[in-house]
Amino acid sequence: MTQTTSKKDERSYPSAFYAAAGVGDIAYEQLRKLPEVADRLRDKAAELADRAANTSGPQWKAKANEYGALATSKAAELTGKVDPVVIRDSIVSGTQQAAEKATKFYDTLVARGEQAFTQQPTAPKAAEADAGETVAEDVPPAAKPAAKRTTPKAK
């Protein structure tokens, strides 16, 4: 009888841990882009401020009123064309697709977290043993009790 091991069995931590690490890795990646994004937004805000200074307010107000009236008439026209069965089917289908995407995204986060976690340097187990700590091979590091630190006594 052959025994197969899945990727889940080989992990040191639960998949939620790796998913959280994946989220942290994505956040770190995005934060590194923040200065560049801030510069672009600052430039865009200056451009829009210049455009706003060169436009007259009453012209925009008239256009907004015109589009508001058009939207109201279109909404009244479309209200009579609503089919609840089509809407329900669309919601069910959309929910199923969203669940599938969420599962794939979670799996992606787990994989990314595993990769980010394994790239971090870890202390060798021999150094831990030399420091007088008990190393349990089958217990994940997060579940190990904290080692008591002893300080030399003054004479």
Image (cartoon, grey):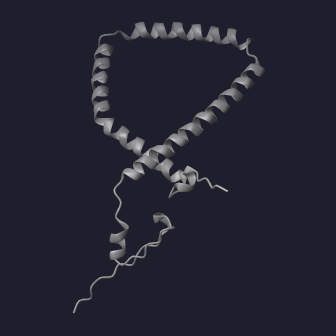
Image quadrant in which you'd find residue 153: bottom left
Image quadrant in which you'd find residue 141: bottom left
| Relative vertical location of residue 86 with respect to residue 103 in this rendering, above or below | above
Please state, as top left, top right, bottom left or bottom right, where the C terminus lies in the image.
bottom left
Q: Is residue 83 left or right of residue 117?
A: right
Q: How many marks?
A: 0
Residue pictured at 51% horizontal, 57% vertical: 13
Q: Position of residue 59 (x, y in %)?
A: 41, 6
Residue pictured at 49% horizontal, 64% vertical: 140
Q: Position of residue 93 (x, y in %)?
A: 69, 27
Q: Residue furthest right?
A: 85
Please state, as top left, top right, bottom left or bottom right, where the N terminus lies in the image.
bottom right
Q: Is residue 121 left or right of residue 108?
A: left
Q: Is residue 103 left or right of residue 87?
A: left
Residue pictured at 54% horizontal, 51% vertical: 15
The residue lying toward the viewer, choosing from 117 and 38, is 117
Q: Residue furthest front?
A: 1
Q: Residue furthest left?
A: 155
Q: Position of residue 25 (x, y in %)?
A: 40, 45
Q: Is residue 20 left or right of residue 41?
A: right
| Relative vertical location of residue 4 with respect to residue 66 in this rendering, above or below | below
Q: Position of residue 78 (x, y in %)?
A: 68, 11
